[in-house]
Amino acid sequence: MSVITAYARARAVAAGVAQPIATVRHVHLAERPLVFVPLTLAGEANAPLAAMIGTDAEKPTLLTVPQPRNRDLRFAFAARLADIVVPYVDSFSHEVEPLRDTVCAVDAPQLIVPNPMGIEFTRLLGRSTRFRRTDGPYAVAPGVPLLGRWLTYFAERAEHPGSCALLALTDALSLHWATGQSALEDTNLAALMAWIDPPAESSGAQAAREAENPKVWPPAGPATDPEFDNQVLAPLIRAYDTSAPDSPARQRALDELEQALASQLEPTWHLMWRGIAHLRSLPPGVSVAGRWAADRRAFTDFHRYVSEGGAPQPRRDGAVAAAYRLNLLERARTTYEAERAFDDPLVMATHRLTGEAFQGTVVSVDRERRVPNEKGNLVTRPLVTVHTKDPVRLPAGAKVAAATRRSQTGLIVSVETVPDGTLVTLELSGGMGRAKVPPPGSVPALDEQLCYSGVLPENIPSPALPPVEETPWTHGGPPQPYEPSDEDAAEVWE
Amino acid sequence: MQNDTDARLRRIRGSARPTRHNARTIAALTGNPGCSRRTIVDTAGVDKEKLARHIGFPSRFGQSEFAITRTNAFQTLLRADDYAELTRLLREVFPEAPEQIQYLDLEATDNTDAQDQRYARDQALISQAIAGNTGATLFDHPLLSLNVAGQNVYLEPELLVFQYGGSAYVVQVRSFAVIDGQANGENVGQAALQAAGYVLALRQTLGNPDAAPPEVLLICPKDFSNVPTITRLDIRWQLIAVEYQLDRLTHIDTLLDALPPHLNLDLGLDASGNPTRPATELIDALRHLPARYFPECLSNCDLAFFCRHEATGHTAALGRSVREELGGIETIAEVLGFAEGTVAPPEEWDEAAALLRGAAWLYAESVAAAAYSGESAALGPSRDSREPERGVS
Ligand code: SF4
């Protein structure tokens, strides 16, 4: 939350419609994302009840579990889900392009779920299926453990700031629009969309209130509406339970269950595609393709690992792996934040307001300035002075970069208050080639408009961690590579 | 004085039976200690759920029968065969405890009038067990009392108390799963906060702050199974928080003194328990009770939809952090007026208003800049898209 977004929320209340807080799209949207709307049975840790899934808005597949407490039926659901997810994922592995001494898939799978709870569901479903075995006493269908590995992969990517392998649509939308309600209420997809795209002749506020009524807009899952559970679902499950297998009564119960669950899923299904279309209407930010390339690489690596028969992800990371991972995520976060601001003046506005970035006009340039570096060699270090009316709070010595000249770093030499603003003088390095005199255009010119930001990808040093094999005993000792045990394969899922 | 207060609270509640506090209501109350409306309504024992429904703002805290069935099954499993599972779990935490744990189910057969006696009995039983410091005893459903806004209230006995080694431990059974040693953080946080209420109540009931250690023994299903697992949770921090917030609750007498003398929230229940009092009268009465709505109320309080409606146009309705970012300014109209310079801010808002003007200016400028550059946003300086981590170097 920032003052700019808070102000945009206030504007949304007055306008009766959500206000933009981004001018470009900061998430990658795949050409054919796999939209996944899961439902779970209330009270259970992770009992799939139904799902609507597919890459085509017009052709969703409906999966249901007539008795979610039945282990065999759960695995049947997992197997059918695997039959959709695994081929979808695999379809991206064929077309590759060279990358350094290896190759990288030209595109990657993308899973979109309605909300953050959908991500959690995905993670848990991955956890409850990836250790299963396809042989022995508790054998499951061949796709199930693969499904588990992939769902786990998606859920882990989702923790990675800027990754778009698995998106929660409410998060993606809230990144671009501020509604006239609270962030908590924004997690309701129907209410959020009501603000972003209110029906004709209705204000966002009104439409959002209506969208909160579970009878009109069934919840986007994974939790279902308790009233639906009690009045519709429970009697139907009972009818299924009490009917004889293969009897007409059972068929009727099955049909009715499918219908009832479809009625709960369909509104969300359409909402998902509407939300995605809305996001697509924004032009992508400049850095989006770069971040997606990281997702493509991660996909390529993991796909190779899985096809070589790699073991399922362990229950928990070892101490060293966990520390590396945290460091990696933190670095990704600062990079993501910096890139978003560079891509989008409206995001940059937040930093300008707090004085961490400033926009202004170049009033003087010393292009050919050369100074000795630590080794005594002369290097080109032009000086540029920018006049700005923004409230600069960056001190001398701070590092900045300009949105339009990202590969060049500026070191603030002085900050001077003048009657109509502030003069900031910067020493530039990088992005000028090797020539003694920087080629034209490689250094800002007089009168050029520039926005310099001090919010940069932080170079968080990797902690001095021991190699994984030398994990000290205080942190559990070197982790044994995770070998799923018989117990894992047989684990109850009730 | 206490009798006066009691009488007044009874009048506010009217003919209905009082609803009891429980760990959830205490946690919710301390989550929003500035809300006098809730303090009064809860302390008077008004049925908020019924009230909200009757005035046209029904809450949505319905429970699915699937969840209820599962919770009940888990509770039953723990108590089956003379508390065999509970005994096993407790001995996991206290391996030195005797193999035979004494257990006492104190659950009452719905007789609310005898609350005082029941409380006295439970208090005596637990105190004796602690003083005797003998063996290990498990008390199921003991009735505890806690001072809330200067009023002693009974808590719904949804807990177990385990006496061992002269200490009384709060044991809570929850039905969220602990998977690979980890549970949903929000669920654990809530459980810890609620347990804190019980620990405070236990200390108060026993008249001895040292009797109940600052921890809770949390019992949850393990992984995807129904097998229980026990976790010993340090709740020192939650205890400090809840105690502090309880202290901050305005004394009920002060709150009552500020109300019109005849104000009451009597629903006028008929023989079958349906409210007959005109909703408008109740809404009028509620408006006399100062509320303090925040979006968190939506997950904590039955009156939330009513209060949210009332808070329309207020910055608090957008969330605490939004309100803070807007400098604490109360209404949307003021925010926009200050931001656009159409309303002159009073002196105390000078700084907040200046920041808002800056925000408004930057917002307009950035949106306009983007519109101007139009599609060219996608034509900005290109970077090698295969090298994402090179970034700015
Ligand atoms: S919903 Fe209303 S009564 Fe309840 S805590 Fe919030 S403001 Fe107070």
Image: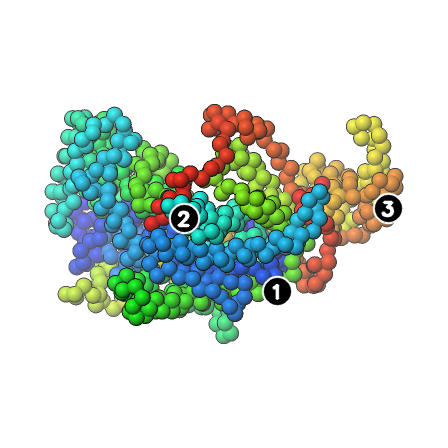
Q: Say whether disc 2 or disc 3 marks the residue closer to the N-terminus.
A: 2
Which residue is at 72% across, 47% downward? A406
- Residue for badge 1: A281
Amino acid type, label 3: Pro
Q: Are marks 2 and 3 on the same chain?
A: yes
Residue A318: in sight, yes or no? yes
Which residue is at 39% across, 51% downward? A46
Check mark 1 vs ligand 1: CB closer than 8 Å? yes or no. Answer: no
- In the displayed structure, A491 sits above or below A4; it is above
**To which quarter of the image does residue A334 belong?**
top right
Q: Are marks 2 and 1 on the same chain?
A: yes
Residue ranking furthest to the front: A136
Q: Chain of mark 3?
A: A
Instruction: Choose between A213 and A251: the one closer to the eye.
Output: A251
User: Residue A139 shows which numbered tag?
Assistant: 2
User: Residue A439 shows which numbered tag?
Assistant: 3
**To which quarter of the image does residue A39 belong?**
bottom left
Drawn side of residue B191 relative to residue A296, left or right: left
Which residue is at 41% across, 57% downward? A77
Amino acid type, label 1: Ser
Which residue is at 32% across, 70% downward? A252
Q: Chain of mark 1?
A: A
Foreground mark, 2 or 1, reads 2
